[in-house]
Image: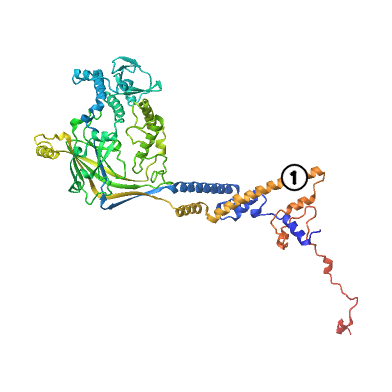
Amino acid sequence: GAMAPGKKITARIKRTLPVKGPQAPTLSELMRWYCLNTNTHGCRRIVVSRGRLRRFIWILLTLGAVGLILWQCAELLMNYYSASVSVTVQFQKLPFPAVTICNINPYKYSSMKDYLSELDKETKKALETFYGFSEGKSKVRRSVDEGNSTGSDFFKQIPLLKFEDFSKTAIDLRSGQKRKIEGSVFHKDSSIVNSGDSNDIIGFQLCDANNSSDCALYTFSSGVNAIQEWYKLHYMNIMAQIPLETKEKLSYSADDLLLTCFFDGLSCDKRHFTRFHHPLHGNCYTFNSGENGTILSTSTGGSEYGLQVVLYIDEADYNPFLVTSTGAKIIVHDQDEYPFIEDIGTEIETAAATSIGMHFTRSRKLSKPYSDCTETGADIPVENLYNKSYSLQICLHSCFQKAMVDSCGCAQYAQPLPAGAEYCNYKKNPNWMYCYYRLHEKFVKEQLGCQQICKDACSFKEWALTTSIAQWPSTVSEDWMLRVLSWDKGQKINKKLNKTDLANLMVFYKDLNERFISENPANTLVILLSNFGGQLGLWMSCSVVCVIEIVEVFLIDSLSIVMRRQWQKAKKWWNNRKRARSGKPPEASDLERQGHDNPVCIDEDLPTFNTALCLPLPQDNPLPRTPPPNYSTLRLETAFTEQLPDTLEVGQH
């Protein structure tokens, strides 16, 4: 059917009107429309500026402003997860920490002689062979000749060796004969060893039990270090075979270690101490362990109100090869914390009064996403072997012990046993030493992955210690004090204690100020959005509505124009293909129909005078103009041929 006249005119206008705004047919027209209508002044100036130079300057300024906004907003986002640190100091009654005290010598040498006789013979023989040192040669030789004990094969496997000028030959301490050494791994003091010193080097060689050609060589620049390391290696092997109950008896009792005790001005005794067996330090005793549910506190600072103990060290019963210093080791820690005496213990010397003043600090860090710390350690895939609250040290030791059990088939003696494992000893695990040294080397070089898995704890307590030492007892009070202490110890009055067997220790709060260091988020979402708004306003005079407008025009509208263009191309190609097949020529009406896809005018709208004026002029017809007036029509012609009689003048009569 024929189209109604009104609809025809609407369709024609729709086809021929220039389309502006979001429905513009091309991207350049859309961008021009956006620049003229947006609130961001820079874009508007690009379009309306006269002259190329001025327009170029405005393009540069606008792009620079956009770049600055992106840079500043990226900085704001990166700093969003930063934290500010606040320090609070408050004066209050403070809980007293746990204080763990150990003798530097773990076990009484007199009690250990049966277990260590073979090892001590080998060590003395090494000293005699290499350094000509002996304490009565006949005695040493006789003791070596006494039958072979269970450990002798073991000493043959890992003897002490003396290397001559970096050659591949070494003297075996047992046979005194030279032997060729395989293996090129220098360990321990290797940087000092390889400095070109021509002195003889002492060390030992560890070989893989399954592959005797795979060896590691451990050398030391000092004979003292070499002998001690070699001794410890065999010592751990022996101790791993002794049951815990036996070891507790071989070490010091509370009566042996503690002579006198005062806390907060009141007397205390061994009942205030809890025994704790450490594999490397023997029996240690913890004051205020909180085991019975009560934790002591102190209401006054100063040395008189802390813990005061006199310790009996008994230097004569020390193992001469295992430890070379005399005294005690102490560590101040929280009741839930494991005392790592071997790592962070403080040494107390004999014949001296050691005062340890404490400052208490509690710290709390923010967890993810602010820092990579853990609240309880539950999210760390490492089993806690220590039965104490999580710490980085516990995690690292537990991780190494697990790797040791997995790789070597047994547990290292210095750390707690995992479930179902047992400590390494040479009889059951002949390869454990080589395996342990190789694994420890990997651990130190961070190749085991423990340092990557383990994280810091988010909250922790710390006691900062200040140590001062005075001579004790003084020369004038030495005589009576030692006699009284000897009496207290239960010895005969005439056998006086030696002052080098005693150590006086004081642990106290210097002040009762608790320092609390905490992290707080430096930014909130409101501050972040305000900062974004400030940047947009400063550089582009833009608001949130402006940002939405940018998203609409540059993403949605631009994409729709591109998609529409592609769709029209595809449609045209398809129609031409169909007509080519049927042999029909392209219809003119198709072009007219394409105009109906232009939605600037809605079909229901009637044409107005303004829209009609926008119509372009047809090319084939001349320009329509207003016709000139016909001047002949201006002449006044009478309608009557003759004058009417009533118009005549009266005067003619």
Q: Where, quadrant-wise, is the C terminus in this rendering?
A: bottom right
Residue 189 is situated, as x and y percent measured from the top left of the image, at 32, 26
Residue 336 is situated, as x and y percent measured from the top left of the image, at 31, 45
Relative placement, left or right, of 612 versus 493 is: right
Name the residue at 68% across, 47% down.
565
Q: Nearer the viewer, residue 533 or 513?
A: 513
Inspect the image, locate mark 1, and give the three-letter code of the amino acid beneath it: Trp
- Residue hosting label 1: 574
Residue at the farthest top position:
177
Q: Nearer the viewer, residue 165 or 336?
A: 336
Compared with 491, 265 (above or below) is below
Give the structural element (helix, strand or loop) at label 1: helix
Q: Nearer the viewer, residue 605 or 216?
A: 216
Q: Nearer the viewer, residue 139 or 603?
A: 139
Relative placement, left or right, of 125 versus 210 is: left
How many residues crowd mark 1 within 10 Å: few (<14), some (14–19), many (20+)? Answer: few
Picture quadrant of residue 386:
top left
Picture quadrant of residue 643:
bottom right
Using the rendered image of the protein, determine whether residue 182 is visible from the camera's viewpoint: yes
Compared with 619, 116 (above or below) is above
Question: Tag count in the figure?
Answer: 1
